[in-house]
Amino acid sequence: MKRLLIFLFCSALLLTMSCKKYLDVVPDEYVTDEDVFNNINLGEQALARLYNALPDEIDNDITAYTDESYHHWSDNGGAIESYKFNLGTWSTTDNPLGNWGGRYQDIRRANIFIERIESIPIPLDRSDYYQTWVPRYKAEARFLRAMFYFELFKRYGAVPLLTTAASVDLNEVANSKIERAPADEIVNFIVSECDAIAPALPQVQEASQIGRATRGAALALKTRTLVYAASPLFNGNALYASIKNRDGKNLFAQGNDREKWKKAADAAMEVIRMGIYALYSPFPDNPVQNYAAQFYNRDYSESIFQRMKGNSTDLDGNLLPNGPPFKGNGKFTPLQELVDAYEMNNGIPINEAGSTYQENGFWSGQLWDGLKFQHVSNISNMYKNRDPRFYASVFFQYDVWRFDSNKRPTKFAFWGDGNGKTDGWANSKSGTNPWGYNIRKFVSPEYDRNAGTGTAKRNSPIFRLAEMYLIYAEAMNEYLGSPDASVYEYINRVRARVKMPALPILPADATQAGMRKRIQNENRVEFAFETHRIWDVRRWMIGTSTQNGPVHVLNAKPSVAELTASGIANLNSEEAGVAVFYKPVVIQSRVFQDKHYLMPVPQSEIDKDPYLAQNYGW
């Protein structure tokens, strides 16, 4: 049997196991690390357990914790947690995204694996094989441990740095007197680990090994870590000046070190110059499809590292519109703030002079329905001539999806009492998407929910080449003080994939501040719904403006007075609903304070270990 099948089988098996024993192995008689590290097959399963702890960047609810979308399932724990997070009512005892204890369990497992994998007895007839693989397993475990530390770093900044199997188990031992390592020390550890293991990892995995760590994955983790470290949140942030250990050691360096940006740029260029990755571009004449297809295919050209996923269509079903032709669950509504972030196809933001953006009126023409171009009519001018990534990422009123089988466009506007006449009203889930948009990105056009045919063959992207391009552009813009040709080159490579005009376009594009704004927006639309946004607004320290205050959807639940004012006699008609639909309305007023840039150390951990300093504002 191919080793990939063994690996995936072990991964699926381990996901179902009890968490009572920290290695979570089967069969039941194997309950200790002594059992595991006396059997190479069980050792391989322990490594699979570490891979299972990787974040899933698409199949979660984090998009609803940002100004990207709103979660509708009010009877679902994910929705309740996102409401709490967005209203600022989470705390030191109730943090939906914290995962402090879980990550330290993962780190402990990795530490034990790293120290013991080389001492596992190997059958004599397999010694040649494992002579190659055991060192690679160890390097993979070091990579995964570095990933787990990055997950803690982006949440908390400074955290305890535990790197040996003998380290105190933070989840079990009280009064451990362990203090947090400074944020720069965590960064240096991640970076040094990535540098050390990169030569031991293959540049390209064999087909049967795809999903395992590669040299590019290690260098991409290094790059992302360094650009976070260079960003305002961690580079001279005065808010954190008073956060110190008991010996007075600052946990967050106060000097604004410009050289950190150069380190990030150099790391990104190291990945780029590997020359083995390319932007996914199989449909260069169709910019919508050229972008969209990578999210429902197993792309290994742009994808540097990914979490492997099965052929489940659960994600497609959750994202598709709710109405009868689509039979989806309409889990999220993209917010108007995100829709407005997509530039016009002339490269000008909608609020800038010369954009040609119009809020009033309608147009007819051709739209891509996932399988082919279809004629559409009565499309709001709000959606005319936008960045092609918009059409690949968002369902909107009278948009089309698999038109030949669905027979009609999407309909999100008010229409009588709903009941199947609209695509946004709940059938079973309380509160399903009545507000004007659905997420289209990731949905596979090969899947027909009516016929029950087709599959969704995708992975969850963790690092892809477009991120390395944009990190390089961002870091060089900050390092140089104003954009040069290389800054434009790498942001324009990302834009060219979807035939967006090259920068500079506006006079402000020639300034550091203007280009910073462009790069931040490029990240926003390129990585929409890929869980970048929640961390980007924090590292850039823009959350108090972007995540604070009212967020908007469209007027899909108008009042009788609004319908009457339309002048249309039949208030329950589709015509009346559309007449009052294209008006932004507040769906939620959100709260983001300075203390929310970093998460609090859980109070339960401080109760066990008073030596853990708390983060600002908590």
Image (tube, rainbow, N blue to C red):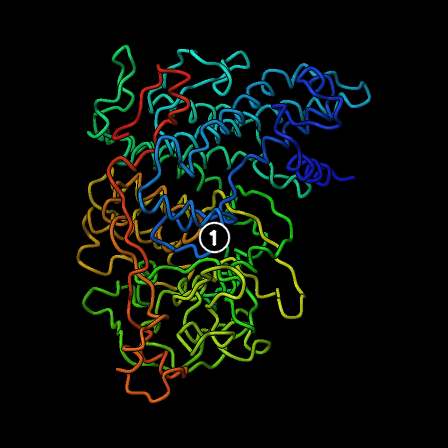
| Viewer-proximal residue among 426 and 265 | 426
Label 1: few (<14), some (14–19) or many (≥20) C-alpha neighbours in 10 Å: many
Q: Position of residue 184 (x, y in %)?
A: 33, 24
Is residue 229 placed above or below 425 in the rendered structure?
above
Is residue 311 placed above or below 404 in the rendered structure?
above
Query: Which quarter shows the C terminus?
Result: top left
Q: Quadrant of residue 416?
A: bottom left
The residue type indicated by label 1 comes to: Leu
Q: Position of residue 477 (x, y in %)?
A: 26, 43
Which residue is located at x 61 percent, y 64 percent?
447
Q: Which residue is mark 1?
A: 279
Is residue 461 placed above or below 377 in the rendered structure?
above
Q: Secondary structure at mark 1?
A: loop
Q: Position of residue 31 (x, y in %)?
A: 70, 20
Tell me if 184 is positioned left or right of 71 in this view: left
Tell me if 40 is positioned left or right of 191 in this view: right
